[in-house]
Image (cartoon, helix red, strand yellow):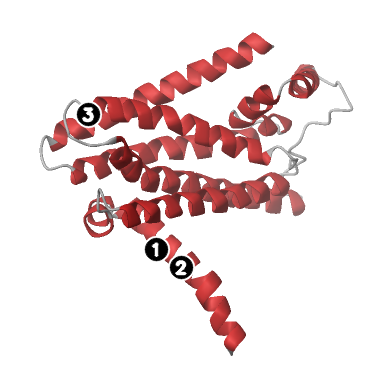
């Protein structure tokens, strides 16, 4: 009985609390901000940070499971999450610079309001990708669809030949540069092992994370006392600028290395 109670307190209850918060952030952002966020309160800030860390940690394990279900698991999964953390920085910085023009929010306040929607978006993207990969793995196991991976031991047709060429090129570049490995993982290079259209699963996570930036805009709008529509628009602008800057900067880096 004591072991069961210990398990409930240390494992089940934190998971239940995290899932409840994720659902609330995703479905009722306005109510969540009013009930759970207290700007300027250090304890409340640390709770938001704890949610973000829990979201990243859970999403990491979901990502590992996703890649192994698809048969493309390797030791580069952690690099994807390093890239995710790095690419979250431009949104926070741009958001802080723009929001300060219309609302008196500190950098800590911007971080506080960003932890929940960004963390929830990363977790949601990982969950949707995991579900999609589980369906694909089941279809492959039952023989409903053919093999979904390229055979890199064969050149074959033009599509197969290009896949082999890219794999050799990526392996060489990753062997020479850790930074390239991190950036390539952030662009979900592992999914290049998959044949179309299964490789499109890679778009689920970044697309969902970007959609959650609209929830971030709702968070900021509810948190301020004035100019709410302007704050909403400014955060959306920050999301667009940060996403575009990150995509083109990293894209140019990858292109320059090839």
Q: Which residue is disc 3 drawn over?
A: 100
Q: Nearer the viewer, residue 61 or 95?
A: 95
Residue at 37% from the left image edge and 45% from the top image edge: 117
Q: As displayed, is residue 28 above or below residue 185?
A: below
Residue 52 at what x, y percent from top left?
45, 49
Residue at 64% from the left image edge and 29% from the top image edge: 182
Residue 171 at what x, y percent from top left?
78, 24
Outermost left residue: 226
Residue 103 at what x, y percent from top left?
17, 33
One can see residue 201 in this view? no
In this picture, residue 10 sits left or right of residue 70:
left
How many other residues sit within 10 Å of disc 2, few (<14), some (14-19) or many (≥20)?
A: few
Q: As displayed, is residue 107 above or below residue 130?
A: above
Rounded to the nearest angstrom, the CA distance separating label 3 from label 2 is 36 Å
Rounded to the nearest angstrom, the CA distance separating label 2 from label 1 is 6 Å
Q: As displayed, is residue 81 above or below residue 144?
A: above
Looking at the image, tell me whether mark 3 or mark 2 is earlier in sequence order.
2
Outermost right residue: 153
One can see residue 71 in this view? yes
Q: Which residue is disc 1 drawn over?
A: 20
How many other residues sit within 10 Å of disc 1, few (<14), some (14-19) or many (≥20)?
A: few
Q: Quadrant of residue 71?
A: top right
Looking at the image, tell me whether mark 3 or mark 1 is earlier in sequence order.
1
Q: Which residue is disc 2 drawn over?
A: 16
Rounded to the nearest angstrom, the CA distance separating label 3 from label 1 is 31 Å
How many other residues sit within 10 Å of disc 3, few (<14), some (14-19) or many (≥20)?
A: some
Under tag 1, what secondary structure? Answer: helix
Whether residues under marks 2 and 1 lie with C-beta atoms below 8 angstroms apart, the answer is yes
Q: Nearer the viewer, residue 158 or 247?
A: 247
In this picture, residue 114 sits left or right of residue 78:
left
Viewport quadrant of the C terminus: top right
Residue at 44% from the left image edge and 61% from the top image edge: 18
């Amino acid at each position: 009985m004591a072991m069961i109670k210990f398990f409930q307190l240390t494992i089940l209850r934190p998971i239940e609390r995290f899932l409840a918060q994720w659902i609330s952030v995703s479905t009722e952002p306005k109510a969540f901000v009013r009930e759970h966020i207290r700007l300027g309160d250090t304890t409340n800030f640390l709770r938001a940070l704890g949610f973000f860390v829990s979201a990243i940690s859970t999403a990491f394990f979901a990502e590992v499971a996703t890649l192994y279900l698809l048969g493309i698991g390797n030791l580069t999964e952690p690099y994807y999450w390093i890239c995710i953390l790095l690419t979250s920085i431009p949104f926070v910085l741009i958001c802080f610079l723009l929001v300060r023009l219309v609302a008196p929010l500190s950098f800590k306040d911007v971080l506080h309001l960003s932890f929940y929607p960004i963390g929830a978006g990363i977790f949601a993207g990982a969950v949707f990708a995991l579900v999609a990969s589980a369906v694909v793995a089941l279809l492959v196991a039952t023989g409903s669809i053919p093999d979904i991976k390229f055979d890199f031991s064969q050149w074959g047709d033009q599509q197969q030949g290009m896949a082999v060429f890219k794999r050799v090129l990526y392996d060489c570049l990753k062997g020479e540069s850790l930074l390239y490995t991190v950036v390539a993982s952030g662009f979900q290079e592992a999914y290049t092992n998959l044949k179309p259209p299964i490789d499109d699963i890679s778009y689920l996570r970044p697309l969902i994370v970007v959609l959650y930036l609209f929830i971030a805009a709702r968070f900021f709008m509810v948190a301020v006392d004035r100019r709410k529509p302007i704050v909403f628009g400014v955060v959306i602008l920050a999301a667009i600028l940060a996403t575009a800057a990150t995509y083109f900067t990293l894209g140019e880096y990858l292109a320059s290395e090839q």
